[in-house]
Amino acid sequence: MRRTPFELAAVATAAVPGLTPMAAASAPDDAADFDSALLLDSEGKRWRVRSPRHPEASARLETEFMILRAFAPAIRAELPFLMPTVAGTVRQGPLSTFVYAHLAGATRSIEELSTCSDALAKEIGVALAAVHDLPQSLVNNADLPSYTANEFRQRKLNELDQAATTGKIPPALLRRWEHALEDVALWRFNPCVVHGDLHEDNLLVDGDSVTAVTGWTDLRIGDPADDFAWLVASNEQRFVESVLRHYTEARRDTPDSHLLRRSALLAEFALAQYLVKALAAGHSDMTAEAEAMLKSLADDIEEQNALAAEEAEAAAAELAASDLAASELAASELAAADGLAAPAVVMASEAKASEGDSAKPTVSVTAIPEPVGDSADGTASTLEAPSEADDTSTTALPIVEPAPLQDAKDH
């Protein structure tokens, strides 16, 4: 049963002695896992309450508490944003409710963020870079998960197998994701510290500044693309490119070239994870919603592929027409030149014919292929273009569902 903000206020008084709530309001959170509220006390101070809805969510909050304690004051001082501070906790049966000191700023929707100023995009990029540049010892000392690039890829393959066993994933999506996960070149990245659950509800903003980052329940060493999936899902290319540019400038390490492609894959795959979670919880409404979103994604991808094929065919036809026109022009110019020299050619040919010479062989002209790559020895070489049938979706993994990820997160 969902707890109201007033019920959470009552729980908070047990967690923080002396707290006297005067007002309470709902706060955005992962609705399937937590009940959250913002409180205003008698002294005008603000507090945030997070109450888990099941034991797994409670374990996540306890893990976050341990993670927050691992952030020593010296590490926090280096970050360009604030982090939560636990003011108190109370245990009720198997569940633990946590009360946090209020952090300035407010959450914004992905639609609001995706149309933000470049100044705020820079703040987001710098915040991401700061997280990814955290010392890995912070994670290792806290005994949190750590994955190499190949271990992370294999983990996603295992999750894909689990999703496939539901029998509810459109075959086109399964093939798309499997091909991408089997493309080893796509998964060559330097593991770093990642937030692991970054999205708009865990980002507090004031004006053009990122004031705080919350939701530290999934800190680990892994793929930095994890923290970009929610950005790519916005479908706002200008916003994503702006954040990535400032992120790249702020990071100590240069991001790999496939970062956004993996982010797009992870954003799509989040729908499959949502389906598995809904089935495990026995939630029929969530399951139906997940199936509908997956079908919509598959339909949109099929439509995009068809459109891309049409554009490619039109471009090829235009190129062929251009080549034909060029060939006809060259032929006409050659014929004109031959017409001017006709008498001499005739006389020469007649002279040779009288000597018994055989006719001159026909000359064929073939186009010289443009070099598109360089071989190891520096000589030009040509590369065979992959056919559309062999597309593994790693050359471009566009996000085509503007709303489903947000919907999935809100359940």
Image: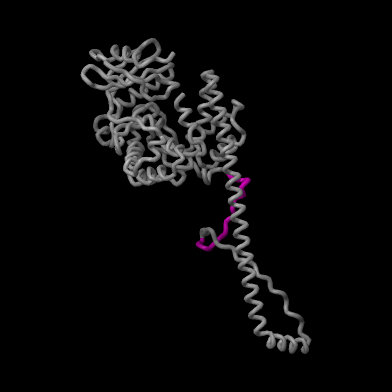
Taking depth in this image into account, of 204 and 275 the one nearest to the observer is 204
Q: Please, what is the dominant secondary structure of the magenta stretch?
A: loop
Query: From this viewpoint, is residue 251 visible?
Result: no
Q: Is residue 76 above or below residue 90?
A: below
Residue 185, percent across and down? 51, 44
**On screen, residue 410 above or below 111:** above
Residue at position x 43%, y 35% from top? Answer: 230
Seen at 23% across and 13% down, the residue is 18
Q: Is residue 400 magenta?
A: no
The structure residue drawn at horizontal position 54% and vertical position 42%, both measured from the top left corner, is 183
Q: What is the quadrant of residue 118 in the picture?
A: top left
Q: Position of residue 178 (x, y in %)?
A: 57, 37
Describe residue 233's horizontal placement relative to residue 215 as left or right. right
Q: x and y percent of residue 282 in the render?
A: 54, 18
Front-most of 116 and 142?
116
Q: Looking at this view, is 23 or 89 the one in front? A: 23
The coloring applied to the image is one colour
Residue projecting furthest to the left = 43
Q: Position of residue 75 (x, y in %)?
A: 27, 33
User: Along the horizontal axis of the image, is 234 left or right of 39?
Assistant: right
The span shown in magenta is 377-391
Q: Is residue 335 left or right of residue 232?
A: right
The N terminus sits in image quarter: top left
Total numbered labels placed on residues in the image: 0
| Quadrant of the image occupied by residue 410 | top left
247 over 88 or under it: above or below = below
The answer to whether residue 368 of the structure is visible from this angle is yes
Nearer to us in this view, 228 or 256: 228
